Image: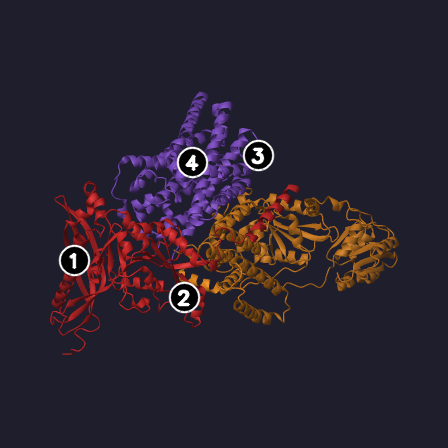
Chain colours: A red, B orange, C purple
């Protein structure tokens, strides 16, 4: 009985401790955290890393809700010799404990990207707290800091607006959106070089808003160094090869009226990419199956007959083929970089051959011949048959 | 410092050697027996001494017969007897009828007792008593005693009747479908209510008297052959070992006989409805009825019973299963929701969806103290409100509750004392906690424990606290049956009535956990024949 | 002999399954052997090895019903050598227990609580285990009878959620690095999780007489092994071989890829806590039981808290850094456990057989 009572009392006293310990190591109160929504990395002129973050100001959100016009986020920057040091130096400019669990986007400046992004990526992957689903984009012709300073009009938080725009790739395949974990996977494997999204700014020098930013196009890498750019059309071609087209528009010439165009909306598209060995030599083989609807007819002409539709289909297929060939030749020629993951496929299919070429795969890749097959169908053309104006 | 506490603890300890050695200041002690004096005057004198100051004690002296003129003293307590029955069945026969007829003739051995018992008194039961102390006890319990001059035997007639609440629907256990009878404060009424549900000679009611000063009547009810003999014996033994002054309510008994007096979980169940008691008896449990309270105890009591309501068996199986699952979810919510909120906000904000997180952060912006203190204060406030709600007088109640809650809540948020998400969390917790009334005594402790666990080490703390409670529960047993049956020692057949309820025709056996391994031949209920296919 | 109420076959089965799964939901035994995408082949090899080991253990148990490992040692080898072997096994159990504690602590500190000192987390885990043991082995089996379902459910749930991310081509090419890493991976797998089932020799005496040990044990190896196999396959397919080898905790990386807004990393922590908990509890239980049976004492309960504290101490002291820890585990551990898991049980079996032959 005695022992029991003593034990209970000791336990009770011990249990009272937690009530007093309010800051129990990892117990960080919500107000003390600064939520980082965007990270920007640049190469500073003195050779160090220039590191910027966009943090949320909670009180500003409250006042915005009630109609005020203060900015909901603030952007602060610092420098350091490693990324981690730059992050620590940032703490001198803010009173909060920065929290990376919800970063929406990471912007990397062009100069830094040319030098190699692996040094920068390492910290984000190693750290358990960072959200690996953040988007990565390269700032072309400007610094990441500028991008971060852009104001958001539609959303409270500019970074969320950026992410939402990037997600529009579903409808507009001219944007390349890549997440952090995909980049790491790509860098890790030998035969798959990453392609990241791009952001450019317009020419104005006034205050930047996110709506003015242009996200079309893509940045091509060789391993982890930036080597070139893809314009919006080339990005579409690239997305075709990667089987990432969800929707999009292809403009083809109107067979009756060559000055006008007919718009075909892509409903479905699936691509098979493969490396086939013919006579021991690898050949790149790409097959696209695509379905679409005719959604906009410019110019006159009766396009309802099946043979006319066939013409349109062939035209569409040709457009897609051209885009694909163009992108591949760019990758083989100008960039000398296998951005399609063909090396991975060879690795998995033919180990012997891979062992011979793996050290110079990018060079080997540039010499491969390509075969592209596109099968394009047009299923429907909306509510009307001929063009709206033509009744007779 | 420990010595003082230990001294105090000894008072509470279960070894109550002090009490029985106390000197009894009464002339009458429950352990004594005294013979009944043959002279009525002596009896009168004795009774006067004992009950001298009670104005409700009535003594009526009458004479029997024309010739013999035997004096009879009738004693009873006014208020505990049916006066009409005494007049009609005792006084009239003795005073009037005995003079009309000629009694002594026709009787082989004329003895007053025999005459009274066999010929004269038309009460339904008439028992001979030889112990004076017992007669006093019986008078105080409501019986009527007839002392006969010249005899050492007194007669006891049970003509009890008093004002009682009657059999009405219990307040705490209202049902939508099912019988609305509830126990009342009279023991005999309660036993009759159970008798009516189980028409079976094996239904036994054993009577005991517990409580040195109150001498409360207790009844052990069980169905012989279904209930486990060991459990019955255990119950008897524990009840007999109770040595205390007063048993005013079954709750007193509960605290004496329970298996784990230091645990917050109750190992003895209670209910106010006879149909629930009947169902539990049929499953093999033992019921303990206590005079003076409508709450009947049932043992053994398992953890799953808190999630079962009597009504479950009268509604459809599918609906009941959904309701049971909701109860389990409500239990989990009302114990862990504040803790989860705290853990997620402070330790793992990355799990919360981004937009929600921003809203919560902006709502919390102006609160001056930590989330833990906020949660703690809200829980405290909720307990205060709940207790106040029980005590508030009826007319004022609704007005105060609605307006007060709205105004209080809103003002508190505007003043920056609590944040809106916290108010919502508390509100949901509060609502969920009303879904399981039987676990009411446990919930505040669980909530607080989980909250502290979350504060120390986040989600892992909640899990750890949960496991610690689970360990505690797994170690508990109620009268020999493991507390977490049928989950803990897994018994698949019994799982049909826990989280979901299978239809009645699918539950073929009595709970194996209660008739654990002792009555193999009576293990199965009668298998109900499903309707045969017509040819 | 173990006093008190005994547990049923189902409870024993659940205990063993959870114990086999243990911390395998996070760690991958085949990693460290550099087998990359052939880890699953190595695992299957180890699985068969596990079955073989189980044959040895079950045979021992059937020849000596209701006897704990320590009693068997004393019977087979005589009092003095038997006692020395018992001390060896006590050391083996407590060191393994400290490994499990250390591994859980490292995970918690790396993933969830970077600033918390590791002793705090280790102490909490061991305290929970000690509390459970003090209540008796029946309570252990009951608690884990319930927790096993949560454990298995969370493992399967995470796998289901990740199905859209599966990429079957990640399993190719086969045997890219040759057969040697696969064999090494297989050896690792036999060492843990399957070799740890030598604990069965201690736990079997808690089960009732009527329990079919064979059924419970083999089904446990089958189901436990299957679940680990599923997690290994999942990790290879989701992450790809390069990423897989580079991760400290593959399962953690897999869960981080699940698309927004779903975030199930708490589930991983939950399953690890339950898994590490049962391993710690069982090791601690075996250890204290061993001490009490070494000295022929009646009750093991007084030893629980001292041994628990000792386990925490050893877990802090044995490695200075997590690199040393993982290096030791992948290089030396598979060879270190061979005597305990394979050699001594084999010898016991041979002795018991000869004794049985001699009797008949």
Residue B411, image x and y in percent? 54, 69
Residue placed under numbered mark 4 in the picture: C197
Left/right placement of residue C136 relative to residue B183 reads left
Q: Residue furthest top?
A: C358
Residue placed under numbered mark 2 in the picture: A72
Mark 1 vs 2: CB contact within 8 A: no
Residue placed under numbered mark 3 in the picture: C299
Q: Residue furthest front?
A: A46
| Vertical order, C337 against B256 (above or below) | above
For the question of whether residue B524 can be seen, the reply is: yes
Mark 2–mark 3 Cα distance, whole angstroms, equals 65 Å
Kindly report which numbered mark, 1 or 2, lies closer to the viewer in this rendering. 2
Mark 3–mark 4 Cα distance, whole angstroms, equals 24 Å
Kindly report which numbered mark, 2 or 3, lies closer to the viewer in this rendering. 2
> What secondary structure is marked by label 2?
loop
Mark 4–mark 1 Cα distance, whole angstroms, equals 60 Å
> What secondary structure is marked by label 4?
helix
Kindly report which numbered mark, 4 or 1, lies closer to the viewer in this rendering. 1
Rendered-image quadrant of the C terminus of chain A: bottom left
Residue placed under numbered mark 1 in the picture: A326
Most foreground residue, A47 or B346: A47
Mark 1–mark 3 Cα distance, whole angstroms, equals 81 Å
Most foreground residue, A151 or C61: A151
């Amino acid at each position: 009985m005695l022992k029991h009572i003593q034990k209970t009392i000791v336990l009770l006293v011990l249990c009272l401790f937690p009530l007093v310990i309010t800051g129990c190591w990892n117990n960080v109160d919500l107000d003390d955290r600064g939520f980082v929504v965007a990270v920007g990395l640049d190469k500073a002129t003195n050779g160090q890393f220039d590191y910027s973050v966009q943090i949320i100001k909670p009180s500003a959100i409250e006042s915005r809700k009630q109609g005020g016009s203060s900015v909901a986020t603030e952007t602060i920057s610092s420098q350091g010799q490693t990324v981690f040091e730059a992050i620590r130096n940032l703490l001198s400019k803010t009173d909060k404990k920065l929290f990376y669990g919800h970063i929406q986007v990471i912007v990397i400046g062009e100069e830094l990207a040319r030098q190699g992004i692996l040094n920068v990526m390492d910290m984000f992957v190693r750290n358990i707290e960072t959200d690996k689903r953040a988007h990565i984009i390269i700032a072309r012709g400007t610094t990441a800091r500028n991008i971060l300073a852009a104001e958001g009009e539609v959303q409270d938080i500019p970074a969320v607006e950026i992410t939402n725009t990037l997600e529009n790739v579903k409808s507009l395949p001219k944007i390349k959106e890549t997440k952090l974990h995909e980049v790491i996977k790509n860098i890790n494997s030998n035969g798959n070089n990453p392609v990241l999204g791009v952001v450019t700014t317009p020419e104005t020098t006034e205050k930047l808003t996110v709506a003015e930013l242009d996200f079309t196009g893509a940045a091509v890498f060789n391993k982890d160094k930036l080597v070139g750019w893809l314009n919006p059309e080339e990005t579409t071609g690239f997305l075709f090869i990667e089987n990432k087209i969800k929707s999009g528009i292809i403009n083809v010439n109107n067979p009756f009226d060559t000055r006008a165009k007919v718009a075909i909306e892509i409903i479905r598209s699936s691509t098979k990419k493969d490396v086939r060995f013919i006579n021991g030599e690898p050949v790149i083989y790409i097959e696209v199956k695509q379905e679409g609807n005719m959604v906009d007819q410019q110019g006159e002409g009766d396009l309802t007959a099946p043979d006319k539709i066939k013409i349109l289909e062939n035209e569409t297929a040709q457009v897609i083929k051209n885009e694909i060939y163009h992108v591949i030749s760019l990758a083989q020629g100008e960039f000398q970089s296998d951005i399609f993951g063909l090396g991975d496929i060879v690795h998995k299919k033919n180990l012997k051959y891979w062992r011979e070429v793996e050290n110079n795969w990018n060079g080997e890749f540039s010499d491969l011949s390509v075969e592209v097959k596109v099968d394009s169908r047009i299923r429907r053309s909306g509510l009307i048959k001929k063009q709206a104006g033509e009744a007779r | 410092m420990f010595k003082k506490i230990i001294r105090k603890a000894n008072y509470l300890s279960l070894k109550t050697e002090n009490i029985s050695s106390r000197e009894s200041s009464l002339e009458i002690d429950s352990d004594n027996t005294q013979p009944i004096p043959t002279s009525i005057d002596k009896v009168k004198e004795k009774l006067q001494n004992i009950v001298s100051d009670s104005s409700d004690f009535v003594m009526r002296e009458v004479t029997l017969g024309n010739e013999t003129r035997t004096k009879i003293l009738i004693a009873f307590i006014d208020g505990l007897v049916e006066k009409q029955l005494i007049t009609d069945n005792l006084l009239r026969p003795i005073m009037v009828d005995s003079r009309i007829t000629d009694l002594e003739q026709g009787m082989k051995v004329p003895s007053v007792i025999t005459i009274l018992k066999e010929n004269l008194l038309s009460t339904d039961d008439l028992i001979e008593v030889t112990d004076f102390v017992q007669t006093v006890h019986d008078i105080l319990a409501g019986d009527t005693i007839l002392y006969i001059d010249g005899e050492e035997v007194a007669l006891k007639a049970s003509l009890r009747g008093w004002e009682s609440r009657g059999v009405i629907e219990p307040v705490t256990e209202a049902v939508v479908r099912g019988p609305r009878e509830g126990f009342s404060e009279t023991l005999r009424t309660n036993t009759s209510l159970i008798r009516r549900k189980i028409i079976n000679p094996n239904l036994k009611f054993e009577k005991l008297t517990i409580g040195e000063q109150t001498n409360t009547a207790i009844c052990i009810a069980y169905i012989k052959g279904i209930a486990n003999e060991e459990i019955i014996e255990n119950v008897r033994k524990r009840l007999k070992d109770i040595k205390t002054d007063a048993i005013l309510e079954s709750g007193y008994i509960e605290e004496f006989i329970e298996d784990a007096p230091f645990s917050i979980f109750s190992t003895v169940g209670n209910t106010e409805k006879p149909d629930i008691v009947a169902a539990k008896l049929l499953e093999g449990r033992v019921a303990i009825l206590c005079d003076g309270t409508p709450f009947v105890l049932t043992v053994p009591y398992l953890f799953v019973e808190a999630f079962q309501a009597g009504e479950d068996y009268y509604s459809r199986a599918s609906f009941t299963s959904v309701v049971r699952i909701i109860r389990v979810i409500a239990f989990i919510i009302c114990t862990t929701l504040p803790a989860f909120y705290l853990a997620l906000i402070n330790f793992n904000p990355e799990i919360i969806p981004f937009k929600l997180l921003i809203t919560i952060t902006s709502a919390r912006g102006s609160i001056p103290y930590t989330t833990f203190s906020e949660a703690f204060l809200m829980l405290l406030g909720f307990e205060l409100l709940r207790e106040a709600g029980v005590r508030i007088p009826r007319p004022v109640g609704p007005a105060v509750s609605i307006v007060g809650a709205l105004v209080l809540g809103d003002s508190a948020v505007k003043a920056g004392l609590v944040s809106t998400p916290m108010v919502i969390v508390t509100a949901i917790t509060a609502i969920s906690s009303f879904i399981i009334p039987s676990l009411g005594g446990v919930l505040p402790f669980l909530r607080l424990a989980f909250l502290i666990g979350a504060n120390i080490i986040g989600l892992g703390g909640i899990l750890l606290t949960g496991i610690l409670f689970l360990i505690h529960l797994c170690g508990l047993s109620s009268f020999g049956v493991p507390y977490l049956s049928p989950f803990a020692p897994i018994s698949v057949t019994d799982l049909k009535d826990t989280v979901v309820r299978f239809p009645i025709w699918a539950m073929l056996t009595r709970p194996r956990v209660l008739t654990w391994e002792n009555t193999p031949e009576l293990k199965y209920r009668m298998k109900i024949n499903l309707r045969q296919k017509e040819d | 002999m173990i006093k008190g109420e005994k547990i049923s076959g189902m409870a024993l089965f659940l205990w063993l399954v959870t114990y086999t799964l243990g911390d395998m939901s996070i760690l991958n035994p085949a990693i460290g052997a550099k087998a990359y995408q052939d880890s699953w082949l190595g695992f299957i090899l180890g699985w068969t090895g596990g079955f073989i080991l189980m044959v040895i253990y079950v045979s021992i148990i059937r020849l000596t019903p209701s006897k704990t490992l320590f009693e068997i040692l004393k019977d087979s080898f005589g009092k003095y050598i038997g006692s020395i072997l018992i001390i060896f096994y006590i050391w083996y159990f407590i060191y393994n227990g400290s490994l499990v504690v250390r591994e859980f602590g490292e995970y918690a500190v790396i993933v969830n609580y970077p600033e918390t000192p590791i002793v705090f987390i280790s102490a909490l885990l061991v305290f929970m285990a000690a509390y459970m043991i003090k209540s008796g082995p029946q309570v252990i089996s009951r608690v884990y009878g319930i927790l096993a379902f949560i454990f298995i459910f969370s493992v399967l749930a995470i796998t289901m959620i990740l199905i859209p991310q599966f990429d079957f081509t990640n399993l190719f090419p086969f045997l890219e690095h040759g057969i040697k890493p696969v064999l090494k991976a297989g050896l690792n797998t036999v060492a843990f999780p399957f070799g740890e089932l030598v604990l069965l020799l201690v736990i079997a005496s808690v089960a009732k007489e009527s329990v079919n040990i064979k059924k419970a044990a083999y089904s446990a190896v089958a189901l436990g092994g299957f679940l680990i196999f599923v997690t290994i396959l999942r990790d290879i397919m989701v992450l790809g071989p390069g990423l897989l080898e580079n991760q400290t905790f593959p399962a953690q990386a897999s869960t981080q890829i699940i698309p927004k807004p779903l975030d199930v990393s708490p589930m991983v922590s939950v399953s690890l806590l339950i898994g590490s908990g049962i391993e710690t509890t069982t090791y601690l239980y075996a250890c204290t039981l061993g001490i009490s049976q070494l000295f022929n004492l009646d009750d093991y309960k007084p030893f629980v808290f001292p041994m628990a504290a000792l386990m925490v101490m050893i877990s802090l002291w044995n490695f200075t850094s997590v690199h040393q820890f993982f290096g030791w585990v992948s290089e030396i551990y598979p060879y270190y456990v061979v005597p305990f898991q394979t050699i001594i049980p084999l010898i016991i079996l041979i002795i018991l057989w000869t004794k049985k032959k001699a009797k008949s």
